[in-house]
Image (spheres, rainbow, N blue to C red):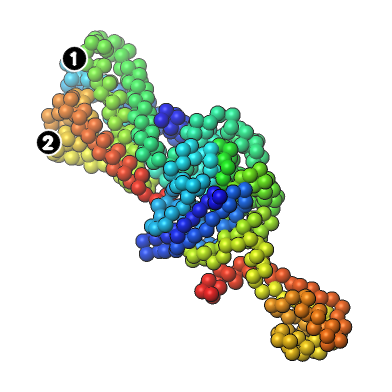
Amino acid sequence: MAVISVDRLTKRFGPVLAVDDLSFEVEAGSVAGFLGPNGAGKTTTLRCLLGLVSPSQGAATILGSPYVALADPIRRVGAVLEASGFHPGRRAIDHLRIAATTAGLPMARAEAVLAEVGMDAFAGRRVGGFSLGMRQRLALAGALLGEPEVLILDEPGNGLDPEGMHWLRGFLRAFADRGGTVLVSSHVLAEVAQTVDHIVIVARGRLVASSTLSELVRRSSGSVRVETSDARRLRDALRARGVEAEVSETVVAPGTTTEVVAQVAADAGVTVTEVTAERADLEAVFLELTSPDGARR
Amino acid sequence: MTDLLRAELLKVRTTRLVVGLLAASVGLVAMGVVGSILAAGDAGTPPLEVPQGVRNAFGNAGVVSILVLVLGILVVTGELRHGTITQTFLLTPRRPRVVGAKLAAMGVVGLAFGVVASAVNLAVALPWLAVKDVSVDVLGGDVAPVLLAGTLSAALYGLIGVGVGALIRNQVAAVVVALVWSFILEGLLVSLLPAVGKWLPQGAARGLSQETLADGSLLPPWAGGLVLVAYAVAFAAIGARLLVRRDVT
């Protein structure tokens, strides 16, 4: 069953079309990466999903119903939307106690989640003095208060140091392995690539891809690099078989496979010393898909 | 609903703002009492020997109402300014309940400010009046109704503050508008056009407490109270409508 379902969602802010007929789903127990450049409509989509922004058209549901209709939402869905959502004069523990009080959760949960995100030493400090990374952790602590089954995180990597990012990846993976569902947005593909099962890519409010990471890589054009003493002859042999290739110090043949190239080399009697499949760089795939040209295709 | 009200009160208590405003009201009320007692009997001001003079000595809750108004504004605009409104609405997506809890919380906070102001008022005025040999009947006379009126006014001003905050949204602008209106414009209208002034919030609050209004006749207490309630309901309704319908971005 789809835990998160965005169905033909459209949101206009005055003349600005922030989200344009966007549809995707996230399955239970998976980590989905929600990717797109800045201004692609990610945050607006998440805010529609959480009932903070009302869609112009279409619908977004969590656990089968609109967020607003969930009874006791904090026990079902945890969300981190922006690092700035704190009163600077308030202590970290008080921020969580307010949330726990609202939801009727025991006060001990506030301390427990603060320890869970490694912030227990800062419980009595005022949030105004926190770094961006500490705010991110505090926000995540708030999302975990009700022990939810779904996590929705908007750019949680912002401001985290490499160690914090590593910790977050491990945390999300463990959360999904326990059966939880995660939708995590980012404008940096590499940040989530190691963690996500599924990738949804948006640009200018529209869906440009929704697939697994490996599908995405397969769809993009990789190339084969060949080390050989007889580069020109191999190139000509490849061309004769309809495979374009370029010669520099090595032979680079885009859009084909190592099997094809090896067979051609063998048939042509060219000695090769190394045949490497070059996966397209993930970042390049992302840029290609989200560029204005990429989206038009 | 009680969880929500407790959470809203916790929000108010966990910033240092409320401490500052409470300290300010203690100081301003004390100064106000001293001013009223010193001025009693001067040109045009009723002396302490008549009931109106006594009422004026105990009717210094007006300034507390304005501080509660500011607090109500800050409670709403602070959530918008710092983005905590996002968490608030995530925790309670049924927004009318949030607005209801905020209004209730500011009512409670206003009452608390009114009680503190009344205590300060009594603590300063009673010993002083005793020294001046003015006998005052706190419970049976004019004192209790005046203090009660000030406390009720403060609570109603808290509701008005929630509405003003939701309406203007920008924290600095909302506070400036509220202060300029309360300390300058309203005062001018009250002294220049008392017939209009008695219908304004401060005029209505004075009707409720029966303090003097410069040269103008006051509304009777029940009418002043009703007018002030009407202002509170109107502002609370406008604020609730805006907070419930707007996108939180």
Is residue A231 visible in the rendered image? The answer is no
In the rendered image, the vertical position of residue A35 relative to residue A242, given as above or below:
above
In the rendered image, the vertical position of residue A169 relative to residue A215, given as above or below:
above
Per the image, the residue denoted by label 1 is: B49
Image coords of residue A60 (percent x, y): 46, 53
Q: Chain of mark 1?
A: B
Per the image, the residue denoted by label 2 is: B195
Q: What's the CA distance linking mark 2 and mark 1?
A: 28 Å
Q: Nearer the viewer, mark 2 or mark 1?
A: 2
Image coords of residue B35 (percent x, y): 28, 25
- Whether discs 2 and 1 lie on one chain: the answer is yes
Which SS class for mark 1? loop
Instruction: Place residue A215 in its image quadrant.
Output: bottom right
Query: Dot 1: few (<14), some (14–19), or many (≥20) neighbours within 10 Å?
Result: some
Q: Nearer the viewer, residue B59 or A15?
A: A15
Question: Are the residues tagged 2 and 1 within 8 Å (C-beta)?
Answer: no
Left or right: B164 in relation to A103: left
**Residue sitting at x 37%, y 49%:** B246
Is residue B214 visible in the rendered image? The answer is yes
Q: Chain of mark 2?
A: B
How many discs mark residues in the rendered view?
Answer: 2
**Residue sitting at x 26%, y 16%:** B144
Q: Nearer the viewer, residue B141 or A267?
A: A267
**Residue sitting at x 18%, y 16%:** B51
Instruction: Place residue A59 in its image quadrant.
Output: bottom left
Instruction: Place residue B3 in its image quadrant.
Output: top left
Residue furthest to the front in view is A1
